[in-house]
Amino acid sequence: MEIRNSQVFVAMCREQLRLLLASADGADSAAIVSGDGFDVASQLHDNISPSRIAAMTSSLHALALAASSELALGANRSVVVESELGTLVVLRVPSAQAELLLSVIARSSSVLGSVLFAARRCVDTIGQRMSGYA
Amino acid sequence: MPKEYVVLFAGPMGAGKTTAISTLSETPVVRTEAVNTDRGRHEKASTTVALDYGEITLDQGDKVRLYGVPGQERFDFMWRILRERALGVVLLIDDASASAMADLDTYLTAFGDFFAQSRAVVGITRADVGVQRSADPYQSRLDERGLALPVFVADARDRTQMLTLLSALIVLFELNPPTKE
C-alpha cells in the first residue's frame, strides 16, 4: 500500500503540520504531498486547493532538482518562492521509503529563516517516523 | 537561414512523451520525474511532473526545442506555461489504452488552438500491442471535427519515425505561419 493511503500516517502528518504552523510565525498553510503531486495531508487556507498545491509543489521540486543537477549544485535542500505578499517553501521529507514533500506558505511579514527552521524540523520528524507505517 | 522552433509533446500518461524526446534529442534530456504512486492509472515506475526538455538540429540547420508536458491533467498549469512558448504540438496517443479515443478528444480540446491553426500532428503509439492497431479511427475522429491533420502510427523509441512526425509538423509551420507573435 502506498503510504499516502495510510490513515494513521496521514493523521500523524496532519498533527506535524499543525505543530509547524503553531511554531513558525507567519506560516499559515502547509501540506505534505507525494513526489508525483498527490495530496497526503494538509492544513490549508480555504482558498487554497489541496490538489492544486500538491501538483504545483511536485513540479516546483522537480524543476529545482533538475536545475541543481544541471548546474552541479549537489543535493537540493529547499525551494523558496519569494513573492510580494508571501513566501512558499518546499522541502523533501528525508526518507528512502517514499518520496514525500512539504510545502509551507507564509505571509510576507514572516522571517524566512524561522519558517525554514520549522519546516526542516517538520520533515525530519516525519522522516524519522515514516518507517513505522510501511 | 536556419530557424528556431519550440515544439510540445503532449498526450496522456504513458503515451511515450519522455521516450520520444529522449529518442530525438541530441543533448542530454532535462527530466523532472517522480516515483509514480498512481499505479491504478498506469503501471510505469516514474512519471513526468513538470517538463522534459531536449534539443535537435534538423538537416537544413533548423533547431527545434522539444518540451514534454506532464500527462496527468492535475498538471495542467504546466500545460498553460509551456503552451505559451510553443509553435506547435506533437500529440501522442497510447493505442494500448482503453481510453485512447477519449484521450484524443481531451487533448484536441486542451490544445485546441494548435489544432485549429493546423500546427499539430498526432502519433499513435504502442499500436503493435494496441486496440485499434491503425491510425484510421483516430484520423476519422479528426475528420469529424473538421481537422485535416496528419495521424501516424509511430514508435516513440524509433528515431526515424519520430523524425517523420517532427518533420511533418515543421512542414505545417511553413504552410501555416504563426499569426500571433
Image (cartoon, coloured by chain):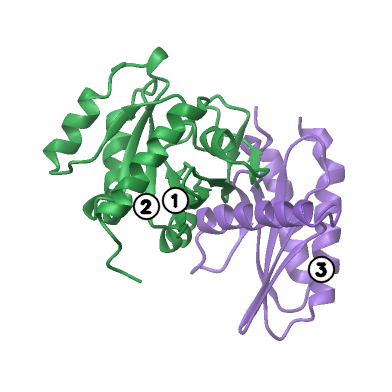
Q: Colour of chain A?
A: purple
Which class describes the residues within 10 Å of circle 3: few (<14), some (14-19), or many (20+)?
A: some
For the residues labelled 2 and 1, the Cα–Cα distance comes to 5 Å
Could you tell me which secondary element the residue under label 1 belongs to? strand
Residue A57 at what x, y percent from top left? 62, 57
Q: What chain is tagged by disc 3? A: A
Mark 2 belongs to chain: B
Question: Which three-letter amino acid code belongs to the residue tagged 1?
Answer: Val
Query: How far, Cα to Cα, is label 2 from label 3?
Result: 41 Å
Amino acid identity at mark 3: Leu
Where A45 falls versus B15 (above or below)? below
The answer, for residue B156, to whether it is visible in the render is no
A113, above or below B178, in the image: below
Image colour for chain B is green
Secondary structure at numbered mark 3: helix
The quarter of the rendered structure image containing the C terminus of chain A is top right
> Residue A91 at what x, y percent from top left?
76, 57
Q: Which mark is residue B49?
A: none
Q: Earlier in the sequence, mark 2 or mark 1?
A: 1
Circles 2 and 1, Cβ within 8 Å, touching? The answer is: yes
Residue B7: give its label. Answer: 1
Which residue in the protein does label 2 denote?
B88
Q: Position of residue B155 (x, y in %)?
A: 45, 24
A51 with respect to A62 (left or right): left
User: Which chain's residue wears label 1?
Assistant: B
Element class at badge 2: strand
Task: Identify residue type, mark 2.
Answer: Gly
A111 vs B161, nearest the viewer: B161
Q: Residues within 10 Å of mark 2 (few under 14, many from 20)?
A: many
Q: Are marks 3 and 1 on the same chain?
A: no
Query: Residue A25 in the image: x percent, y percent?
Result: 77, 78
